């Protein structure tokens, strides 16, 4: 996976967002583009990545007309966590959330993403593949 790419960017859902069920069993559609899917999780595009060992981030990408959140998933090569964080930070800078709570403002000012910022230039300009230590192959 990702042999020719550093990042894979997808939506977090294969459909428009759905309201969360109060009992924890949120159900989505049972069909996507005419294909049957499990209404409990088949429309969620984030869970399969949990089984691959690739770093991934799910970040807010905006709101629907009905003010439901839309998420974007950024998936990186194995062991390339810094690339995923750098891309997430870059997107956040060019597409900030419409409103930011005091808690989110504190998180943003904490400097957590500052370790990823120096890698931004490398991430988007380096033509050669990322090196993975041999012991991780």
Image: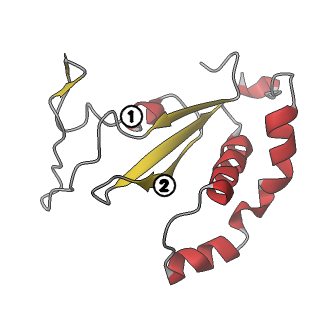
- Is residue 120 found left or right of 79 in the rendered image? right
Find disc 2 in the rendering and name its residue: 60
Q: Is residue 96 above or below residue 127?
A: below
How packed mark 2 is, by other alpha carbons closer than 10 Å (few <14, some 14-19, many 20 or more), is some
**Residue plotted at (52% across, 80% down):** 103
> Which of disc 1 and disc 2 is earlier in sequence?
1
Query: Is 48 positioned to the left or the right of 77 in the image?
Result: left
Cα gap from disc 2 to disc 1, whole angstroms: 14 Å
Establish if 101 lies above or below 94: below
Which of the 4 quarters of the picture holds residue 125? Answer: top right
Residue at 19 percent of width and 18 percent of height: 34
Closer to the camera in the image, 66 or 41 = 66
What residue sits right under mark 1 in the picture?
45
Mark 2: which secondary structure? Answer: strand
127 vs 65, nearest the viewer: 65
Q: Which quarter of the rendering shows the C terminus?
A: top right
* Residue 55, image x, y percentages: 59, 39
Residue at image coords 49%, 34%? 10
The answer to whether the residues at label 2 and label 1 have Cβ atoms under 8 Å apart is no
């Amino acid at each position: 996976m990702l042999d020719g790419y550093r990042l894979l960017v997808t939506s977090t859902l294969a459909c428009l967002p759905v309201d969360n069920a109060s009992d924890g069993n949120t159900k989505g559609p049972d069909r996507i583009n005419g294909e049957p899917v499990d209404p409990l999780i088949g429309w969620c595009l984030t869970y399969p990545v949990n089984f691959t060992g690739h770093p991934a981030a799910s970040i807010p990408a905006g709101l629907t007309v009905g003010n439901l959140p839309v998420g974007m998933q950024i998936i990186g090569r194995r062991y390339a966590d810094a690339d995923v964080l750098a891309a997430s930070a870059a997107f956040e800078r060019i597409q900030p959330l419409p409103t930011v709570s005091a808690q989110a403002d504190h998180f943003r000012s904490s400097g957590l993403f500052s370790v990823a910022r120096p890698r931004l230039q490398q991430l988007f300009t380096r033509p050669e593949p990322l090196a993975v230590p041999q012991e991780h192959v």
